Amino acid sequence: MIYNRCMVVRNLLTILCKSCEHLVHTAVALTASNSTARAKKWRDHVAYYTIILLKYTVFALHFNSEYLEFGNDDGKCEITNMNEENFRIPVQLAYKLRNEIMKCKYHEELKGLLLPPEQILAIGFVDEYMKAFHDLEGMVTTPFPFPIVQMARSSLFVWLISLPFGLVQDQYPLHGMCFMVFLLTFGFIGLEYVSIEMSDPFGIDATDFDIFSMAEITFEDIYVTILNVDGKNASEALHHRVGNPIIEAMKF
């Protein structure tokens, strides 16, 4: 169950990153022939909001993982509010991104930059992103049912403790029985430890997903896309405007 949950989370992370890449690729490809200052500024805004959206999504996931490590201390109420607010920010940014795309329909200086079917296509990538985000939010903020964990773990320990008594018989040699008990204990306790490690894949442990590297690859792909269409200056300006999301995330 933990493994299946972990793989679903991994697939949702892939959807988040790929939706950002496809959105910027589509927006840039459909407007690449327009080299006016307004078109360049619009592409820059779309790329910027896309990067910031993924950036704060990574922030929210990482902070939630750290939040789960807190105990019942005096500051937990404030931290809980902060954790909830972190998941609201991507929703607000998604609205800004949708609004930026729809400016091609309502803004006088941008009318005709994207045709209505092209706007729907671009909005569709934002919708795909937000669907994956809400699915991911629901999974990470809903803990695995504690009664199931408690009963499974208690049953495991009782079985391992009582197992040697069931193997104590004359026809079983002592060294063979000791080896069997050790092997079963090592295997089942090891599987339980692995399930504990995999239950929260957004931390900084060696077994966790490297969400910062996944996001960084997406950011670099967006920078290269802007570089190929609007030039080095536009790409560097976007990079400077965004800053270093990964360093900021580690300090968050």
Image: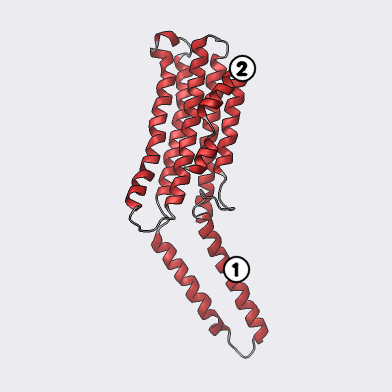
Residue in the picture at 60% in, 23% down: 225
Q: How crowded is mark 1: few (under 14 residues within 10 Å), some or many (20 or more)?
A: few
Residue in the picture at 52% in, 14% down: 40
Residue in the picture at 62% in, 91% down: 170
Residue located beneath label 2 in the image: 231
Q: How crowded is mark 2: few (under 14 residues within 10 Å), some or many (20 or more)?
A: few
Residue 181 position by quadrant: bottom right
In the picture, the disc for residue 244 is none
SS of the residue under disc 2: loop
- CB atoms of marks 1 and 2 within 8 Å: no
Q: Identify whether 191 is placed above or below 163.
A: above
Q: Identify whether 185 is placed above or below 212.
A: below
Q: Which of marks 1 and 2 is in front?
A: 2
Closer to the chain start, of discs 1 and 2, is 1
* Residue type for callout 1: Gly
x, y percent for residue 95: 39, 27
Residue 29 position by quadrant: top right
Q: How is the image coloured?
A: secondary structure
Q: How many marks?
A: 2
Residue located beneath label 1 in the image: 187
x, y percent for residue 82: 37, 44
